[in-house]
Amino acid sequence: MDMKKVFDYIETLRPEMLDTLGELVSCPSFRSEPEEGAPFGPAARKCLDKALEICGGLGFKTNNVGGYAGTASFTDGESVLGILAHLDIVPAGDGWTREPYQTTVEDGLVYGRGTMDDKGPAVSVIYAMKALKDLGVPLKSGFELILGTDEECGSSDLRYFMEHEKMPKWLFTPDASYPLINIEKGRIAAHFSASAESESLISLHGGKTVNAVPASASCELRRSEKISVKALTSAISTLGISAKFSVCENGELIKISVEGVSAHASTPDFGDNALTALIKLLAAVIPDDPAGKLLCGLNITFPYRETDGESAGVKACDEISGALTLAFSILDYENGRFDGAADIRFPVCESVGSLSEKLGAALRKIGFEPDIGGVEPHCVPSDSPFVGKLLDAYETVTHKKGECLAIGGGTYVHGIPGGVAFGCEVEGIDNRIHGADEFIGIDALIENAKIFAQAIVNVCG
Ligand SMILES: [Zn+2]
């Protein structure tokens, strides 16, 4: 098949693609209260109906899977390839300078919530399919587009889909980055708690979500001979900490605040952990206090600036997936009780069971009761023929080198056998996914459609 014809045809579909993207963006399809037939709320259901209606209008067979997901295809028989995109979004949030729930075209970019994550990529798949169908490109095996509606809130759409439909043997999701992600590290969320009365520490708070390095932390201490603004300021100056401390006095209380730098838990090196910085200070200032002793244990097990888990006894690394990362993400102390959490992303050489055991032992040793859970790593071999066909499609269209990536985060296909992530973010461009003024380039929308058309031909042709 002469793919140039297909690519040229896709170029002519720009106006239709922009219209379709506009229609999908106009549904604020973030999760809301379920209703009959709308498990993730009426807006998500409306967006699914709209997408399937558009697909039907282009001549594809469509199937609504219980309002959880939908499929569209123009091939007969069983699908060996599935392309999995999602229509749900996160709410707009603050800071937009354009309308979030309608598309705005400006200087070759389309703005709007979901343009990049993941409605734009879904539109590129739909028009890749239209091009192949309209030009009568011969395909030997079947494929389908699968549209989910709960990617952002736990992927229960896929669990429902797999209970009611057959998942194709090969699957890719255009919901991450190019070139291709074949390894997603495993994840551990560790919660831990301990009780200790304290003469000095009144309260402590740092971090809100398990999967982020906390940018700020604070605590209140009771003023005493040893605990004064002067003593604390002098202690801070000897710690060698880059996070910024401020100490202020309010009657009998001294409040310490720390400002660091936030980062996603899968890349803790990019952050400056305000919480472990505060723990380091308190371990130096109140080492003999009962709460202080527990903080000393945390300071030894999860030292400031250490992100490889070495001191917690969980350090691990392998060639295909890289090193384990550990982010100490939450600690609260209130009414004599500590509650904390840490997030670990681990390579394929490790497992949830073995790491839970090691981390649990480390936590018990310093007086904390652990509650640890996790998911195993996800891996599709980089030398599988399916991966090779996708990378070939990427190279053919972009003329860039295709390669496999391992990441610490999880994508839509985590845990689905044979699934990889393929597109659509590219290095060096911040499409502001989940942020204000999210956008996709119109040229990228077209290029993605060409890559997907080539991928479908490579796998099914
Ligand atoms: Zn997404």
Image (tube, rainbow, N blue to C red):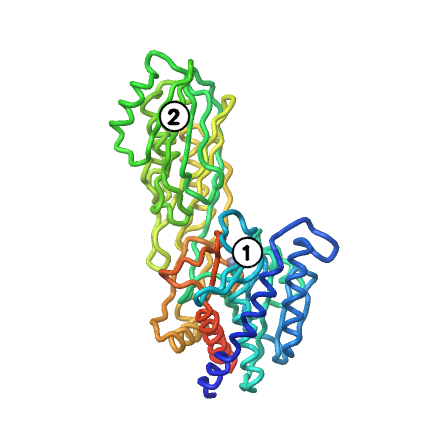
**Relative side of 298 to 34, left or right:** left
Name the residue at 49% across, 31% down.
339
Residue farthest along the right direction in this orientation = 36
Q: Earlier in the sequence, mark 1 or mark 2?
A: 1
Q: Is residue 407 visible?
A: yes
Which mark is on residue 268?
none
Q: Position of residue 401 (x, y in %)?
A: 34, 71
The residue identified by callout 2 is 256
Say if 157 sits above or below 390 in the image: above
Q: Residues within 10 Å of mark 2 (few under 14, many from 20)?
A: some
Three-letter amino acid code at disc 2? Ile
Three-letter amino acid code at disc 1? Glu
Q: Nearer the viewer, mark 1 or mark 2?
A: 1
Say if 389 sits above or below 367 in the image: below
Name the residue at 29% across, 27% down.
236
Name the residue at 50% across, 24% down.
334
58 and 64: which one is in front? 58
**Relative side of 239 to 51, left or right:** left
What is the secondary structure assignment of the residue under circle 2? Answer: strand
Q: Position of residue 51 (x, y in %)?
A: 63, 67
The residue identified by callout 1 is 99
Residue 398 lies in quadrant: bottom left
Q: Position of residue 390 (x, y in %)?
A: 44, 73
47 and 167: which one is in front? 47
**Relative side of 443 to 78, left or right:** left
